[in-house]
């Protein structure tokens, strides 16, 4: 099962593998002990970029189009949105986040409307 186990905000994303893993270690998270499907997200102060650290020292990087602030609701969907090249698609993440928000709104309203 893919899941984000920790999110670090206000991270300097100019950092390399060693700097990012050292930052996680300050919070007692050893990136070398990540299990398959576990991911750690590092987000910059402006919330325009995300680095996702995964097992075997794999880092994926997402930079928002035109330096727009990323929708933070995408974080929980990151693991499900990896593509075969190892990266992930922001439009796909955003769609999942929006669909989940709509489903939650419909569920709370008690409506019989269903999303396909």
Image: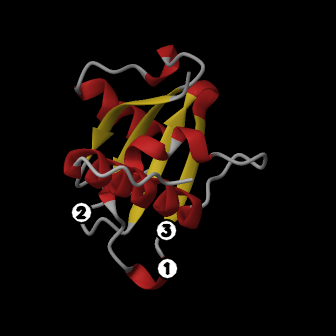
> Which residue is under mark 2?
45
> Which residue is under mark 3?
63
Question: Which residue is most to the right?
Answer: 84
65 vs 85: above or below:
below
Q: Nearer the viewer, residue 34 or 113?
A: 113
Q: Judge depth for marks 1 and 2 and give the one in front.
A: 1
Residue 64 image offset from top left, x and y in percent? 46, 72
Q: Earlier in the sequence, mark 1 or mark 2?
A: 2
> Which residue is under mark 1?
65
Question: Which residue is most to the front?
Answer: 112
Coloration mode: secondary structure
Q: Which residue occupies 39% across, 47% down?
A: 75
Q: Nearer the viewer, residue 67 or 33?
A: 67
Q: Which residue occupies 24% across, 63% down?
A: 45
In the image, taking residue 45 as reference, residue 38 lies left or right, namely: right
Q: Secondary structure at mark 2?
A: loop
In the image, taking residue 84 as reference, residue 6 lies left or right, namely: left
Residue 30 in sight in this render:
yes
Mark 3 and mark 2: span between their CA atoms?
A: 13 Å
In the image, taking residue 101 as reference, residue 59 lies left or right, namely: right
Q: Nearer the viewer, residue 55 or 114?
A: 114
């Amino acid at each position: 099962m893919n899941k984000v186990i920790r999110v670090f905000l206000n991270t300097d994303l100019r950092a390399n593998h060693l700097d990012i893993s050292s930052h996680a270690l300050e919070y007692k998270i050893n990136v070398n002990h990540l299990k398959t499907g576990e991911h750690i997200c590092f987000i910059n102060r402006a919330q325009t970029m995300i680095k996702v650290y995964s097992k075997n020292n794999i880092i994926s990087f997402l930079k928002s189009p035109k330096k727009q602030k990323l929708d933070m609701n995408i974080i929980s969907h990151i693991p499900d949105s990896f593509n075969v090249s190892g990266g992930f698609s922001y439009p796909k993440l955003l769609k999942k986040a929006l669909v989940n928000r709509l489903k939650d709104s419909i569920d709370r309203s008690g409506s019989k409307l269903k999303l396909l």
